[in-house]
Image (spheres, rainbow, N blue to C red):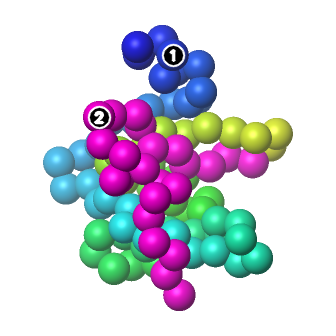
Amino acid sequence: MKNNIKNTLDDIPTPENNAQSITGLIKENGEITGYQLSNSKKISKQDAVNMARRGKIKGVGIAHNGNTEYLKSVPNDSESDNLGNLPTVE
């Protein structure tokens, strides 16, 4: 299964012990532009990618579409923590 995950994700960083999780999505015109973290901090999509790469966000991998990098949930047995199932926040 790890190979299938790797086919859709460019990188699955190892999270630090104190890594945050994503609890909400910030959207503009239906497009994700940022995220809310478990410490209530709101960050841009690019900052989230950079944080995830450094192990500061858990449960996500890094993917790309063209030249744009973005986060995807690392597949597990739970649907509830998938990024697409998270609430939109202001």
Q: Position of residue 21 (x, y in %)?
A: 32, 59
At horizontal 41% and vertical 37% (from top left) the residue drawn is 74
Is 13 located above or below residue 82 in the figure?
Answer: above
In the structure shown, which secondary structural element does the residue marked by tag 2 occupy?
Answer: loop
- For the residue pair 77 and 70, the one nearer the viewer reads as 77
Q: Which mark is residue 15?
A: none
User: What's the residue type where badge 1 is placed?
Assistant: Asn
Determine the residue located farthest toward the bottom in the rendered image.
90
Total labels drawn: 2
At horizontal 76% and vertical 76% (from top left) the residue drawn is 29
Q: Quadrant of the N terminus?
A: top left
In the structure shown, which secondary structural element does the residue marked by tag 1 occupy?
Answer: helix
Residue 89 drawn in magenta: yes
User: What's the residue type where badge 2 is placed?
Assistant: Asp
Observer able to see residue 43: no
How far apart in space, not on screen, are marks 1 and 2 (Cα)? 15 Å
Q: From which residue to which does the magenta span run?
A: 68-90
Q: Position of residue 72 (x, y in %)?
A: 52, 44
Mark 2 surroundings within 10 Å by alpha-carbon count, few (fewer than 14), some (14 through 19), many (20 or more): few
Q: Which mark is residue 77?
A: 2
Q: Which mark is residue 4?
A: 1
Is 33 located above or below residue 21 in the figure?
Answer: below
Is 40 located above or below residue 30 in the figure?
Answer: below
Q: Position of residue 90 (x, y in %)?
A: 53, 87
